[in-house]
Amino acid sequence: MALKYSRQREVIKDFLCTRKDHPTADIVYMNVRQEYPNISLGTVYRNLTLLSEIGEIRRLRVGDGVDHFDADTSPHHHFICSHCGRIIDLKMENIDYIQETAEKDFNGRIDSYSAYFFGLCENCCNLLQS
Amino acid sequence: MALKYSRQREVIKDFLCTRKDHPTADIVYMNVRQEYPNISLGTVYRNLTLLSEIGEIRRLRVGDGVDHFDADTSPHHHFICSHCGRIIDLKMENIDYIQETAEKDFNGRIDSYSAYFFGLCENCCNLLQS
DNA sequence: TATAAAATCAGTAATCATTATCGATTTTAT
DNA sequence: ATAAAATCGATAATGATTACTGATTTTATA
């Protein structure tokens, strides 16, 4: 009962699901506004935060100073192109044992980890060498 | 010749070397000011950025919205306590092969990666169970 | 179906970290 | 000693995000 339906939240979630890139709150705002012109930026932020708190989306902090959001909550890692800033999903073998590796000499509890990879995406590789 | 000596930069670097935690620009500012009362916050930011660009220190973006700085530039990973926010150096086996794992199915160039581990530090573990 | 409590909203102001600007000062090669 | 260039302190500007507020919407219950 603490969480009520909201059309705005649904539209935000639906939009995010259509995207394979990892849009920022502002980009979500600009896009959702086309379908829902009165929506406020604050509403977008509030719902993105709420959705990520209940686990329906993921918040990505890739280190560029802006939060990105991902509707794909399945475990996967990301690559960030140092040239164009694009964030790309990585399909790679499970590396969860790095958590066990970290736990070995650590007094405390490790619950999760995040791994980000940096370099040049395919596009920028080609661009820069030609 | 492009880089001239600056007393302020030296003091900032020296202070950072005395710390094993990973202070923010503001904390560096507050501490350095005791020895150097006229220093400006902008100068602290400028020199922390400069020092990390020339590789004398490392900038850490752990996801709490504030940049942290580390005078230890040797390769190592960090643990962030979800409860108290403390950032702790991890002594762990090398896990650089996760980069090779990531490269396998990726078209592009991977130059580096970052790995952060989250959970409860020893202190908070004890605090919360008692 | 009517109603009322609580969640959510739109709009806007406030906050917070960081960066940019600018005239004055300091460094350093000559 | 000097002059070009880097750096400084002070402060304004920026940009992302959060907080506030009175109005609107949702929803459980009568």
Image (spheres, coloured by chain):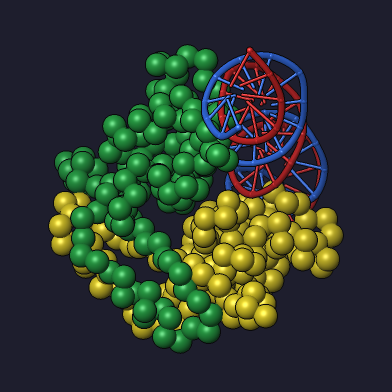
Chain colours: A yellow, B green, C blue, D red
Please determine whether, in this image, residue B100 is positioned above or below residue B113.
below
Front residue of A41/D7: it is D7
Q: Position of residue A48 (x, y in %)?
A: 60, 58
Quadrant containing the N terminus of chain B in the rendered view: top right
Residue located at (52% from left, 15% from top): B38
Q: Position of residue A66 (x, y in %)?
A: 60, 54
Quadrant containing the C terminus of chain B in the rendered view: top left
Q: Position of residue A76 (x, y in %)?
A: 44, 75
Report if residue B84 is visible in the image.
no
Task: Report the side of B103 relative to D13 (left or right).
Answer: left
Report if residue A44 is visible in the image.
yes
Residue pushed farthest bottom? Answer: B105
Task: Report the side of D21 relative to D8 (left or right).
Answer: right
Residue located at (59% from left, 61% from top): A68
Residue located at (31% from left, 46% from top): B72
Q: Quadrant of residue B118?
A: bottom left
Task: Report the side of A27 relative to A109 (left or right).
Answer: right
Q: Position of residue C6 (x, y in %)?
A: 58, 46
Residue located at (49% from left, 28% from top): B6
Please determine whether, in this image, residue A106 is positioned above or below residue A117.
above
Q: How many marks?
A: 0
Front residue of C9/B66: it is B66
Please determine whether, in this image, residue B86 is positioned above or below residue B36.
below
Please determine whether, in this image, residue B26 is positioned above or below residue A18.
above
